[in-house]
Image: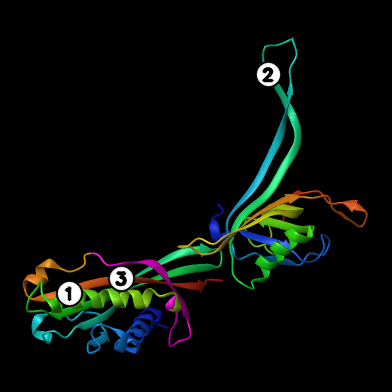
């Protein structure tokens, strides 16, 4: 069934759909297991988004059902020349826009390709805002995590 | 040893004599309440307080997952509004299996609170207390019921 990867695919699709309304309308995005964060793999000033199915936790709901909690990490990486410059500012704004997009009530439920409906559980976690060690190397990496819940029948 | 999901809670859509048991699979934690009123007996003959048993207090209280259109949720909420008397059984296993034991009683739903927490699933909190009920001109009392098949 692969609900986890299907949720990640839907997150990719929703970000792609909204591209024209985001600070960067030109970016790379894909579902991955290993985020693209190395400078040699990035084009300067072009964000690379990796959507990762990163964690799975089961939580017994009642005698016949279980809540399955899927964590989806959205990793935004961008090669920036100046850590305090406009491009870096825009990348942070871009991450906020993606969080706002996916947290909107209109997307409180996602339907996967397999027809399963998952609900976003707030709050979204964006901590730390960026990785300072990677920024010293000229790459701004920001990770935000979204929890999606699936009500799985166990009867 | 009973454990969580192995226990089963039922409501009867038939009669006491010929039951049709519907499992409330949405139940979460279920409490079977049994207590006896304490009637004090004191006189000057002794400094010690004595008590005797009064009436027995029973109840089945539980939380359950609320889902829109769910038959069990709808039935329990409707029973509260209509004052419906129905039979319930809180068992330590499957009611079709020999030896399964639990409290069986006719009762009314006296509480059906819905919680709609922002970060949690919707939940119904149910309280059922025993109610007078006759079948075939005979009173049906609550009982500790053991399945014998």
Percent position of residue A34, x then y = 21, 79
| Mark 1 closeness class: few <14, some 14–19, many ≥20 residues within 10 Å | few
**Region of the chain picked out in magenta, as a range:** A107-127
Q: CA distance from mark 3 to mark 1?
A: 20 Å
Residue at position x 81%, y 48% in the image:
B141
- Magenta stretch containing residue A118, yes or no? yes
Q: Nearer the viewer, mark 2 or mark 1?
A: 1
Q: Chain of mark 3?
A: A
Mark count? 3
Q: Position of residue B118 (x, y in %)?
A: 47, 62
Could you say which is closer to the camera, residue B13 or residue A40?
A40
**Marks 3 and 1 close (CB-CB < 8 Å):** no
Label 2: which secondary element: loop
Residue B39 image-quadrant placement = top right
Report which residue position mark 1 lands on: A89
Point out residue B148 in the picture as x, y percentages from the top left corner.
74, 58
Question: Could you tell me how far apart the alpha carbons at marks 3 and 2 are, in whole angstroms?
Answer: 62 Å
Closer to the camera in the image, B55 or A77: A77
Q: Residue at x 93, y 54 (%)?
A: B137
């Amino acid at each position: 069934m692969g609900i986890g990867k299907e949720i990640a695919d839907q997150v990719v699709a929703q970000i792609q759909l909204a591209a024209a309304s985001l600070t960067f309308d030109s970016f790379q995005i894909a579902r991955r297991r290993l985020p693209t964060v190395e400078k040699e793999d990035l084009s300067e000033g072009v964000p690379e988004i990796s959507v990762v199915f990163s964690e799975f936790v089961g939580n017994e709901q009642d005698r016949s059902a279980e809540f399955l909690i899927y964590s989806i990490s959205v990793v935004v990486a961008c090669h920036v020349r100046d850590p305090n410059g406009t491009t870096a500012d825009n990348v942070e704004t871009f991450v906020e826009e993606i969080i706002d997009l996916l947290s909107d009530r209109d997307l409180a439920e996602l339907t996967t390709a397999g027809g399963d409906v998952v609900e976003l559980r707030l709050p979204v976690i964006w901590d730390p805002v960026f990785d300072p060690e990677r920024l010293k190397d000229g790459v701004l990496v920001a990770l935000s995590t979204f929890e999606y819940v699936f009500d799985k029948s166990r009867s | 040893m009973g454990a969580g999901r192995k226990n089963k809670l039922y409501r009867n859509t038939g009669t006491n004599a010929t039951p049709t048991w519907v499992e409330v699979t949405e139940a979460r934690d279920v409490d079977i309440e049994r207590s006896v009123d304490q009637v004090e007996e004191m006189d000057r003959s002794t400094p010690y307080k004595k008590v005797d048993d009064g009436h027995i207090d029973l109840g089945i209280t539980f939380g359950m997952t609320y889902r829109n259109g769910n038959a069990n949720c709808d039935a329990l909420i409707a029973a509260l509004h209509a004052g419906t008397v129905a039979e319930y059984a809180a068992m330590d296993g499957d009611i079709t299996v020999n030896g399964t034991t639990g409290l069986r009683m006719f009762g009314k739903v006296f509480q059906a609170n819905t919680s709609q927490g922002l970060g949690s699933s919707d939940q119904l909190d149910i309280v059922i207390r025993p109610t007078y009920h006759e079948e075939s001109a005979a009173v049906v009392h609550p009982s500790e019921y053991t399945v014998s098949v």
